[in-house]
Amino acid sequence: MQTGPMRIDAATAPGTSGHPNEDWVSAALPVQGQGGSLLVLDGVTPPRGGGGCVHGVPWFTARLGGALVELCGSRPELTLRAILARSIRRTADAHRQTCDLSHVRTPQATVALARWGAPDGELEYLVLSDSVLLLQSPEGSVEPVLDDRLDRLPREALRSQASADALRNAEGGFFTAAADPAVAERAVAGSVPRERVRALAALTDGAARWVQTFAEGDWTACMKLLRTEGAQGLIDRVRARESAAAAAGSGAPRWKLHDDATAVLAEF
């Protein structure tokens, strides 16, 4: 059980005013020896009029996120991959009678998840698709946990919706949490000694743009920004940089003016 103080800071912002925020964030503090967890989900927006689901992406991310948080706290004997698989199955069961879960754009999300218990135990982590986890050591070095399969695909393969969908949750492509529990085995997962983590952060790709799209700094600088200016400070800087890039007429592959952006920081 966590014995020292913790600081949790989180912020999330929709990409477009008046549109639902499809990101989802949670940080659970240790309770009765069960350990704590930190989670962000980035819902995948379907094309207009598509997706095969009557509920929508925000419903899906709330269901999946709630299941992940509950199982992280109640089932410490399960690995994070097993927890993700059970959470996907539970969420799919909640709407398989009303929705087409075989649709390639059925509601789905990226995942960045961490769980920890006693200070002398392990901190477990899992990342699926392009959300990011950052682990900072007591000495200050920052290790990103990335699933870079999407970034390793040829740019031309992502230029049309049809070609991108052909690579979605497919061999040789990239994977997201949708309706198939087996995708949990595709996640990047591992653990580090809990005592080797001074702070950790989770970012959806909308917040990670500060590093990945605009190259304003590396992951170490990003963690420093989070610790000094907070999660909202990072998002504000991303929004300012997006607006400047749009005014200059520049962008990047898969770039849209604003994306839902979420960041959460936990300091031990």
Image (tube, rainbow, N blue to C red):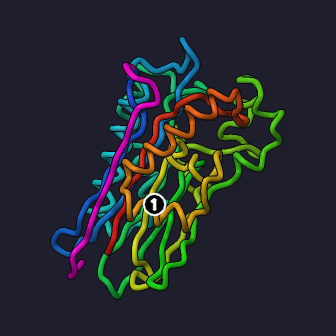
Left or right relative to 106: residue 149: right
Place of residue 207 in the rendered image (x, y in percent of width and height, measured from the top left)? 50, 46
Q: Residue at x 51, y 38 (%)?
A: 240
Q: Which residues are magenta?
A: 1-18
Q: Residue at x 40, y 21 (%)?
A: 19
In which quadrant of the rendered image does the N terminus lie?
A: bottom left
Q: Residue at x 61, y 62 (%)?
A: 218
Place of residue 214 in the rendered image (x, y in percent of width and height, measured from the top left)? 64, 46
- Identify which residue, 76 or 7, lies in the foreground: 7
Place of residue 259 in the rendered image (x, y in percent of width and height, measured from the top left)? 52, 33
Amino acid at circle 1 = Leu
Residue 63 seen from this side: yes
Q: Residue furthest left?
A: 32
Q: Is residue 132 above or below residue 17?
A: below
Q: Is residue 73 above or below residue 39?
A: below
- Identify which residue, 2 or 237, lies in the foreground: 237
- Identify which residue, 224 or 204, lies in the foreground: 224
Which secondary structure type mostly characterizes the magenta part of the structure? loop
**What residue would you read off at disc 1?**
225
Place of residue 53 in the rendered image (x, y in percent of width and height, measured from the top left)? 46, 21
Q: Dot 1 lies on which element?
A: helix
- Identify which residue, 240 or 20, lies in the foreground: 240
Left or right relative to 80: residue 167: right
Q: Is residue 234 above or below residue 47?
A: below
Q: Is residue 38 magenta?
A: no
Q: Residue furthest bottom?
A: 120
Q: Residue at x 46, y 66 (%)?
A: 224
In which quadrant of the rendered image does the C terminus lie?
A: bottom left
Residue 88 seen from this side: no
